[in-house]
Image (cartoon, grey):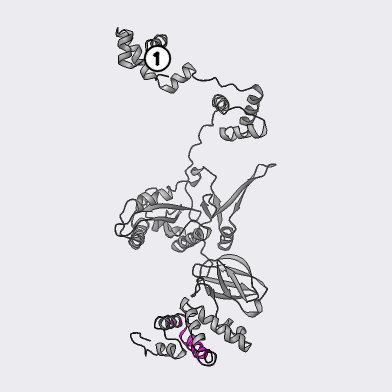
Amino acid sequence: MHSAAMRYDVLRAREAGLDARAIERLTGVPSRSQRRIFQEVIPFGMTDPQLHDVRRVGRPSHLKEPFRETIAAILAGEPQLQVSELLRRLRSEHGYTAGKNPVYTYVRAHRPPAPAPLPTVRFEGVPGEFAQLDFGSLSVTYTEAPGEKLTFFGGRLKYSRALHVSLVPGESTEDFLQGLEAAALAWGGLPLWNVVDNAKSSVLRREKDPSSGKERVHLNPHFASFLREVGVFAEPTYPYSGNQKGSVESLVKFVKHGFLLARRFRSRADLERQLAEWLHYVNEERPCDATGVIPALRLQEEQPRLRPLPFGELGYGLAFPAVVGPDARVRREGCQYSTPQGWIGQTLTLRLHQEHVVLHYDGQEVVHPRIPANGRYSLLPEHRAPLFVKPRGALMAKRQILMDLCPEGLHFFTELVHRRPDTWREQDLPAAWELFEQMGEERMAAALRYCVTHRAYGGEYLRAWDQGLVTGVAA
């Protein structure tokens, strides 16, 4: 089929007095096709889709009346339903077997008009009433280091426009709460209502009651627990309803265009340094475009209305139930954490903090490093005694603890057992354990690494390293 532009050229050539052969040489359209084109009306500027609609090119789409009635009923209840979903329902529920074109053509002509867009609602908050919270991500290039994709958490108070941005590893619930906690510490607390998007880190799902039509929002349980402990509330926005966020500027866009895309960075460390400078500028020096006032000044008015965080020095920790195993340990994220002997078989609460894990049971708590020094388990000194009740059990338990300090520990004791099968129990292991209790995990691991590197297997070599008697190593 010849295009609308080509047809127009044929008509114009005919009007100029050219014969059929000349027109064919000029346009490539044969004389038989020219005769059909001469009978058409091709206005200047007509597009090919318009030509198709006028000429009704192709096999006509025909939809039987029962399917038309079914489509009309579906569109009456869901006027904005996608045609692909409507077609799926017709085929799976109503026995439609023909092609998709008749359905698409009919829907295009008979879909109820979309409602007029609602005006954007802009409103101001009172002090301590609202904050906007959101994630953002952007690929950043460095001039002196490989680039990376950054994820950041941003928060902004509606009244004062005080802004806080922190870099986070991802968009998990823990990342969200750590960013929220950092913003609250920077502001001096949280407002009454915290506006969040419908990400899984804050909102799990929405359900509508079929009888009442009311919608219920199911918050992420960790986020809900955080809000309860602080004494504030969340206000999730409705999907595709950005006008709920009021007069606060687009937070993510402001951070990207005002900072990340407006500057150059040498490295990640340089970006973090410039971020601190930029936050000081936008909060302490620059008057806000919306209010005309420096945010720090209005923050002074707002802070008495903010709710301070009630968490201690460790901050908020995600709470999980955990059962203490027969080895007096609980497990989380591939790591093990020791407990008192009396907790065996009990269900306790494990709090996952940024740097620590805290176990709570019956009014008591046990604090561990979140990432154990040996990468596998954390065994506190006060929890070792039950392992040493039986003589042979004590011997093997002490050896296992030393072997687990570092990968070289296994190699050290493998060589020791085979080189000194008669003396390692009575001489080398007691000496090594005594040094371990004096030096701690890090120095003992360093001593084991040195001995393995220099093929020195024995308690006397560990003691020599500790006393600084080995060449090139300070105690």
Residue 88 drawn above or below residue 388: above
Q: Quadrant of residue 214?
A: top right
Residue assigned mark 1: 42
Q: Amino acid at mark 1?
A: Ile
Q: Can residue 470 be spotted in the picture?
A: yes
Q: Is residue 364 above or below residue 102?
A: below
Q: Position of 292 compared to 406: left or right?
A: left
Q: 431 or 167, which lies in front?
A: 431
Instruction: Check residue 425 for magenta coloring.
Output: yes
Give the magenta range.
423-444
Q: Residue furthest right?
A: 211
Q: Work out whether residue 233 or residue 367 is closer to the camera in this orientation and state it.
A: 367
Question: Visible in this render: residue 45?
Answer: no
Give the answer, above or below, for where 343 lies relative to 102.
Answer: below
Looking at the image, is 80 positioned above or below residue 314? above
Quadrant for the N terminus in the image: top left
Residue 427 x/y as whole percent:
51, 92
Q: Position of residue 248 (x, y in %)?
A: 44, 48
Residue under the image location 61 percent in, 87 percent down: 392
The number of numbered discs placed on residues in the rendered structure image is 1
